[in-house]
């Protein structure tokens, strides 16, 4: 029986997550799932007007990472991610809310969706 493994790297921007992810992937032969920054339809708009686009951007990342998790679980290969679903919900979205770049209504809506999605994921955190 093959044991599926899902490894996710967390850390600050510029900390070396992608480099570590690439090194581990190459060494162990794992598949890689990167953060979607090249086709993200909200990223450029977010940097132009953070208040207007913060909720949309966070929903996009939440959906993208959740989709990755579902695909990883259906697969048979070991996969490493260079960003987790938890960083968005516990770091990035709360910071946007605290900086008044995301309304309380939007943050509450976002976080309730995160709780629902994450209730279907059983992480092992080391």
Image (spheres, helix red, strand yellow):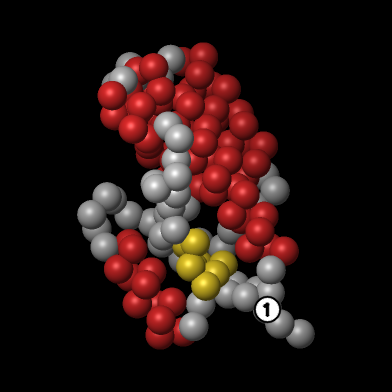
Taking the view exactly as shown, the residue that stands out farthest to the left is: 14
97 up-or-down from 123: above or below: above
Taking the view exactly as shown, the residue that stands out farthest to the right is: 1
110 up-or-down from 79: above or below: above
Residue closer to the observer: 116 or 69: 69
Q: Residue at x 41, y 81 (%)?
A: 26
72 up-or-down from 66: above or below: below
Q: Residue at x 35, y 28 (%)?
A: 46
Which of the 4 image quarters holds residue 57? top left
Residue 53, x across and y down, in percent: 41, 23
> Which residue is identified by label 1?
3
Which of the 4 image quarters holds residue 20? bottom left
Q: Residue at x 62, y 32 (%)?
A: 113
Residue 3, x across and y down, in percent: 68, 78
Q: SS class of the residue under badge 1? A: loop
Residue 52, x across and y down, in percent: 39, 17
Which of the 4 image quarters holds residue 70? bottom right
């Amino acid at each position: 029986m093959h044991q599926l493994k899902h490894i996710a790297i967390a850390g600050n921007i510029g900390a070396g997550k992608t480099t570590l992810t690439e090194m581990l992937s190459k060494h162990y032969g794992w598949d890689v799932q990167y953060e979607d920054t090249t086709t993200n339809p909200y990223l450029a708009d977010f940097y132009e007007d953070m208040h207007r686009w913060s909720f949309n951007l966070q929903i996009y990342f939440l959906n993208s990472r959740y989709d990755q998790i579902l695909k990883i679980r259906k697969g048979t290969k070991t996969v490493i991610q260079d960003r987790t679903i938890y960083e968005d919900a516990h770091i990035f979205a709360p910071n946007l809310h605290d900086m008044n770049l995301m309304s309380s209504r939007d943050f509450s809506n976002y976080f309730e969706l995160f709780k629902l999605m994450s209730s279907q994921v059983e992480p092992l955190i080391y």
